[in-house]
């Protein structure tokens, strides 16, 4: 046997590392994610020479494809990239294999084991295996159980499982799923994906905070008056009504992506830069978070749903007219809420979180607003004084900006806000990798830093489960506010901030 995947040295966020010999097994290989995200990310890693020559991808799904058919289908999905790197694709695709596997028939996994053993001999992959569950969430638990029963998770140094979102539907189901997957292997073998953590700019929240000495002393309730976290999309539900109807924006975006951004923004500095130290701090801050009004949540949460909109030449249909959506659906495509974090750093500082589909602009950002100067010595050119603001631009136009007042030119002493800006594009000139490139490499390297641990997932679900239960039991208490497509969401979401004499930032 060759080198196990797990690097015994402490692993933190670091320079590019080459993946150890191994086989990546993708369950759900005929699905959308494999062709759209996973294979392009693997091909990118191959082109960056971060995959070893002893490497294989084994696609698994129910369809009875051959290796060649799988290669051809993946080539169709990656046609644009292949045009640029045809020779590299020739080499890369010779490492792709396919096995027809039905995860709901665990007794058939014996055949999978034999195939993996033969790939080990062929590709020298040393029994190092990463199993990627890109399947329906109802198979996450049973899939892990089947792998464990087949003895495929026996060696924690050589085998791990990557699990896509959603990990559970609420606190109780996430807890049950954690118990189940942890009974199949060690927590160190479980990699729960949140693709936002693969984004360079989300990781940059940590670097901005902890690599600079100027931010940390003011990163607290004494200096920051409020925080806004936004993930706005222009797209609608697209072809995913089947999933989205039973999910909605809280489960689809808030419990995972927005909550991860909140955790990185609000966590304490870790003692060391290693995976567990970071995840400990994220879990701790999420355990201290709560809805601003736990007794009457309708005071701190607004749900919305998009109606038709767009222009005469390109009209957009409303959510209820999308294919697969119930005509009276009350699924939210927009949500805004207010949270508090009850700890020494953040007590009393509101965190406003919002996300929605079919909004005016595609933009994700974290905005920290600082307290106003205690005395206003100067007249403000715009009428009222502004507060300093730090905006961490997650996407697009990745970077950050800081708003501060300067003297407005001319006679007199009027103040006026200006922006100081950092842009990834201008400073580094090259586009950053897709999140899946980073996350796939890290999972295969056994580095869990950018994956969510069981306690983090549970803490995030615990935070929103009262809302989800209320929506299920008494939906009229959290009614749906309709909003026109390509606007900034329902007016009611503005009142959420107006109560605190604030307004949403219009990026
Ligand atoms: C996914 C959600 O997790 O994230 C989608 O299921 C959403 O509904 C997507 O569109 C947004 O990701 P990104 O990277 O485009 O902001």
Image (cartoon, rainbow, N blue to C red):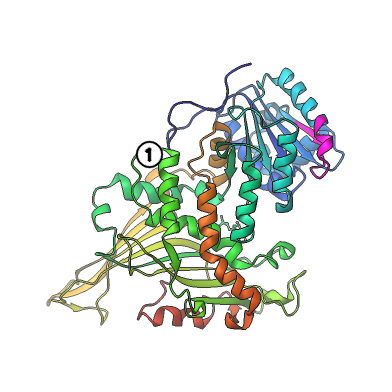
Residue in view at x 55 percent, y 37 percent: 188
Question: How far across and how far down the image is residue 116, in percent?
Answer: 75, 26
Instruction: Judge by depth and name the residue closer to the eye, 143 or 233.
Output: 143
**Dot 1, how many residues are within 10 Å of its Cα: few (below 14), some (14-19), or many (20+)?**
some
Q: Position of residue 340 (x, y in %)?
A: 40, 67
Give the quadrant of the N terminus: top right
Q: Which residues are magenta?
A: 97-110
Q: Is residue 167 visible?
A: no
Indicate the position of residue 293 as horizontal and vertical percent values: 45, 75
* Residue positioned 15% across, 75% down in the render: 375
Q: Could you tell me residue 475's position as x and y percent?
A: 63, 79
Residue 267, compared with residue 348, is above or below; it is above
Q: Which residue is mark 1?
A: 273
Q: Ligand 1 quadrant?
A: bottom right
Secondary structure at badge 1 equals loop
Q: Is residue 101 magenta?
A: yes
Closer to the camera in the image, 216 or 184: 184
The reply to whether the magenta stretch includes residue 19 is no
Quarter of the view holding residue 379: bottom left
């Amino acid at each position: 046997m060759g080198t196990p995947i797990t690097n015994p040295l402490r692993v933190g966020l670091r320079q590019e590392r080459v993946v150890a010999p191994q086989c990546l097994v993708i369950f759900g290989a005929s699905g959308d994610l494999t062709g759209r995200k996973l294979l392009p990310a693997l091909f990118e890693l191959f082109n960056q020479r971060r995959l070893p020559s002893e490497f294989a991808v084994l696609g698994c799904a129910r369809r009875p494809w051959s290796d060649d058919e799988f290669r051809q289908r993946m080539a169709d999905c990656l046609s644009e990239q292949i045009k640029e790197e045809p020779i590299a694709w020739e080499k890369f695709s010779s490492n792709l294999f396919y096995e027809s596997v039905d995860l709901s028939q665990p007794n058939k996994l014996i055949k999978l084991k034999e195939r993996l053993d033969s790939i080990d001999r062929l590709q020298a992959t040393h029994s190092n295996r990463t199993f990627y569950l890109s399947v329906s969430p109802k198979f996450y638990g049973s899939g892990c159980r089947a792998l464990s029963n087949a003895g495929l998770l026996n060696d924690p140094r050589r085998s791990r499982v990557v699990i896509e979102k959603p990990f559970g539907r609420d606190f109780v189901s996430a807890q049950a799923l954690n118990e189940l997957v942890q009974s199949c292997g060690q927590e160190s073998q479980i990699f729960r994906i949140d693709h936002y953590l693969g984004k360079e700019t989300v990781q940059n929240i940590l670097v901005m905070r902890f690599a600079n000495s100027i931010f940390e002393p003011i990163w607290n309730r004494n200096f920051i008056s409020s925080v806004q976290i936004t993930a706005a999309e222009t797209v609608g539900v697209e072809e995913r009504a089947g999933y989205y109807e039973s999910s909605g924006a809280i489960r689809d975006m808030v419990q995972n992506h927005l909550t991860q951004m909140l955790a990185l923004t609000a966590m304490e500095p870790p003692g060391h830069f290693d995976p567990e130290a970071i995840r400990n701090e994220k879990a701790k801050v999420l355990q201290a978070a709560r809805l601003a009004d736990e007794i009457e949540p309708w005071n701190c949460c607004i749900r919305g749903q998009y109606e038709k909109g767009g222009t005469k030449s390109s009209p957009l249909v409303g959510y209820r007219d999308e294919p697969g959506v119930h005509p009276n659906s009350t699924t939210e495509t927009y949500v805004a809420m207010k949270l508090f974090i009850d700890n020494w750093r953040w007590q009393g500082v509101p965190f406003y979180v919002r996300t929605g589909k079919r909004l005016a602009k595609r933009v994700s950002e974290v905005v920290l607003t600082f307290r106003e100067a205690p005395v206003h010595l100067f007249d403000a050119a715009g009428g009222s004084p502004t507060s300093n603001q730090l905006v961490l631009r997650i996407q697009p136009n990745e970077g950050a900006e800081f708003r501060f007042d300067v003297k407005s030119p001319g006679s007199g002493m009027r103040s006026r806000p200006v922006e100081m800006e950092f842009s990834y594009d201008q400073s580094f000139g090259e586009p950053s990798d897709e999140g899946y490139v980073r996350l796939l490499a890290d999972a295969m390297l056994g580095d869990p830093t950018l994956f969510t641990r069981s306690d983090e997932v549970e803490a995030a679900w615990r935070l929103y489960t009262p809302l989800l239960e209320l929506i299920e039991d008494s939906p009229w208490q959290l009614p749906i506010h309709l909003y026109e497509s390509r606007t900034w969401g329902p007016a009611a979401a503005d009142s959420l901030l107006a109560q605190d004499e604030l307004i949403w930032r219009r990026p």
